[in-house]
Amino acid sequence: MGMAYCLEHMHQLNPPIAHNNLSSSDISLTEDYASKIADFTFSNNIIATEMELSSKKLPDLPLACLENNVYNFGVLLFEMVTGRLPYSVDNVSLEDWASDYLRGYQPLKEMIDPTLDSFDEEKLERIGEVIQSCVHRDPKRRPTMRNVTARLREITALTPDAAIPKLSPLWWAELEILSTEAS
């Protein structure tokens, strides 16, 4: 949920900011298992500075970048549910391995991470629906991160406050540095 809230926030900025290549290697966990997205490339900020210097209008972020973030987020959700890394199944991509599920031929519960002791099948199926909508072949039919976050919040009941790390002194130090730099 922390990733979803972060991406939703970034996509709601004016202009929106998209993560250029969101993948599991860009996600870190704090001591209390809250997620943090790293490795941002702020190409929009560079473009904005150049455009301001030349007195031209800032171009909007291509919708494709936001749609790619939604797709990549869906892949991350699938990785978490299945416990699989992108290329960990006999050197076959996660998407190829999951193609039966993605086409609707295999239930998600048959692909669940075998180390999970228990899970709520109804919630899993609902999360599976979110995953499938995020990785839809037609980027125009993918939901926005705002919609993804709302659907996941209905399923998990995790509020933004619950997704914020509470125990990590490093997290709070980073926030302090960022707020000082912003002012």
Image: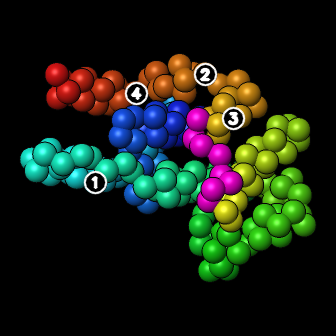
Q: Amino acid at mark 3?
A: Leu
Residue 143 x, y percent position in the rendering: 65, 46
Residue at numbered disc 1: 43
Residue at numbered disc 4: 168
Q: Amino acid at mark 2?
A: Thr
SS assignment at label 4: loop
Mark 4 neighbour class, 10 Å CA radius: few under 14, some 14 to 19, many 20 or more: some
Task: Work out how far the residue at label 1 is from the one at label 2, CA to CA, in angstroms.
Answer: 30 Å
44 and 35: which is toward the camera: 44
Q: Is residue 5 left or right of residue 130?
A: left
Residue 143 is one of the magenta-drawn residues: yes
Mark 3 neighbour class, 10 Å CA radius: few under 14, some 14 to 19, many 20 or more: some
Mark 2 neighbour class, 10 Å CA radius: few under 14, some 14 to 19, many 20 or more: some
Q: Quadrant of residue 108?
A: bottom right
Residue at numbered disc 2: 159
Mark nearest the camera among 2 and 4 is: 2
Residue 51 is one of the magenta-drawn residues: no
Task: Work out how far the residue at label 4 is from the one at label 3, CA to CA, in angstroms.
Answer: 24 Å
Residue 94 x, y percent position in the rendering: 66, 69
139 and 57: which is toward the camera: 57
Residue 118 x, y percent position in the rendering: 83, 40
Q: Earlier in the sequence, mark 1 or mark 3?
A: 1
Residue at numbered disc 3: 152
Residues drawn in magenta = 139-146
Mark nearest the camera among 4 and 1 is: 1
Q: Earlier in the sequence, mark 4 or mark 3?
A: 3
